[in-house]
Image (tube, grey):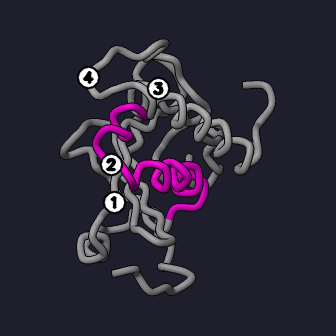
Amino acid sequence: MDKILTLSETTARLLEVVNELKLIPVGRPIHKYNELLFVARLPEHISITINVPKDTDVYISRMALKHLIDRRKSKAEHIVRTIPCAIMKPLKIVDNSRKRKDSFLFFYTDRLVVCVVLEKTKTTRDCQVVSAFPVHPKIYKKMIDISGRAEFPPFELPS
């Protein structure tokens, strides 16, 4: 990708696609389902944490977005808004490789605690968001952060 978009530009583009995909009934085929949409470029300290090259880009497919919309219904738009923030400024990063090879959980919160599942791709040097969902604060608290950072700033989890 030549030009890195701002967080607000990225979020706006993702929400445009979400609005388009909301119009498609559950179970119906979607146009360009494998098309990848830019989410963020991983900051260097996160690239080091998950062992990917510096300047690794993160994408999400239209199919993953449609699945998120169909599963999360009224929370989908909020979760999609949260995805770029979770990738750029996660509160915790958890190694999920025991359940799914080369995958990590990125947590972020504002009104909801959101978990974004990020996978290293096998064929390119990029990463892909494969899922995102709300998480109960008790589950979040049990997750072990691999980034080595203290939980900062301290915050209160939404209940």
Label 1 sits on residue: 134
Which one is closest to the eye, mark 3 or mark 2?
A: 2
Rendered view: 135 above or below 13: below
Label 4 sits on residue: 27
At label 4, which amino acid type do we have? Gly
Q: CA distance from mark 2 to mark 1?
A: 9 Å
Label 3 sits on residue: 62
| Upstream in sequence: badge 4 or badge 1 | 4
How packed is label 1: few (under 14 Cα within 10 Å), some, or many (20 or more)?
some
At label 3, which amino acid type do we have? Arg
Rendered view: 8 above or below 110: above
Cβ–Cβ under 8 Å for marks 2 and 4:
no
How packed is label 2: few (under 14 Cα within 10 Å), some, or many (20 or more)?
some
Look at the image and tell me in which quarter the C terminus lies.
bottom left
Q: CA distance from mark 3 to mark 1?
A: 20 Å
| Upstream in sequence: badge 3 or badge 2 | 3
Report how many numbered discs are placed on residues in the image: 4
- Residue lying furthest right: 3
